[in-house]
Amino acid sequence: MFDVEEFARIAPDWSRRLHYHKELGSTNDEALRLCSSNPAEPLAVLTDFQTSGRGRRGAAWMSEPGGGLLFSVVIKPRYEKKYWSRLALASGLAISSVLREQYGLLAEVKWPNDVLIEARKCCGILVETQGDYAVIGVGLNVTGSPQGDESVSLSELTPRLGSRETLLAELLTALTNEVNDCADQFEQQVGRLRELCFLEGKQITFKANGKIFTGLAEGISDEGELMVNIDGQSISFLQAEEVRAV
Ligand code: BTN
């Protein structure tokens, strides 16, 4: 179970902004509900277990009690909405950077919003919006990976994890810094994302605009799009679903 007192010791500023529940339906749902009351932000909603965790495209997000860090960050970006499509990438960058720098894990960003280690998913990100607020939901597998063979947990990969309270504090700080910067420092972020791009150089299939495409992932464009070589032509995609390396 998450130790709220320990978290308050490690991260007093964040602890005042943390809404912790032992169990919730979904932290994103609770965060969206909080947005209705025009809250001061950033704030975070955390739970040990979700009874109806949500993934992208309406999928369920499975978790084991206490096995993951399941949280949602509420922010009110100070920049124009045209930049909000960058939030997922900036969040993936933040999470991967913490896993690399603090824990020596070779985390990669799978465009547009997964974090992988050794080609297995350890973290999914679900960005939703309400009015002037954005909710960034993060499901990070810490000790369990109940999403199937293609998922992995951090504890399977490193003995030097430390406490969940410390990890959460590191993630919240990195995530809010990156999302704050993604309007005016995106060029620098894209440079770092290119170093961590899981898909680059891989043959992939994906769905975009209702159609299935196959091609060679060339990398991430200056705008954060995925550039794919399809039949000799380089095409950039801002959104795509079900991206798979084949
Ligand atoms: C995905 O990979 O499809 C995104 C998964 C996002 C899961 C997290 S867990 C915390 C937050 N609350 C939810 O209901 N979903 C996100």
Image (spheres, rainbow, N blue to C red):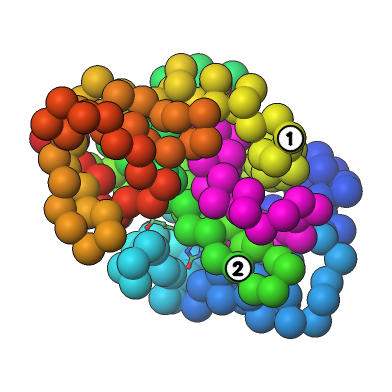
Q: Secondary structure at mark 1?
A: loop
Mark 1 to mark 2: distance in Å?
A: 21 Å
Q: Position of residue 109 (x, y in %)?
A: 42, 33
Residue at numbered disc 2: 129
| Residue that carries the numbered disc 1 in the rendered image | 184
Q: Residue at x 74, y 43 (%)?
A: 180
Instruction: Compare marks 1 and 2 and give the one earlier in the sequence.
Output: 2
Range shown magenta: 71-97
Which quarter of the figure is the N terminus placed in? bottom right
- Residue 16 colored magenta? no
Residue furthest to the front in view is 233
- Residue 215 higher or lower than 164, as above or below: above
Residue 68 can be seen, yes or no: no
| 180 lies left or right of 216 | right
Q: Residue at x 27, y 30 (%)?
A: 234
Main SS of the magenta segment? helix
Please name which of the two marks, 1 or 2, marks the residue nearer to the observer. 1
Instruction: Identify the residue at horizontal 76%, vertical 51% (top origin).
Output: 79
Badge 2 marks a residue whose secondary structure is strand
User: Which quarter of the picture shows residue 135?
Assistant: bottom right
Near mark 1 (Cα within 10 A), the count class, few <14, some 14-19 or many ≥20, is few
Q: Which quarter of the picture shows residue 103?
A: top right
Name which residue type carries label 1: Asp
If the picture is divided into quarters, which one holds ligand 1? Answer: bottom left
In this rendered view, identify the residue nearer to me: 169 or 192: 192
Ligand 1 within 8 Å of disc 1? The answer is no
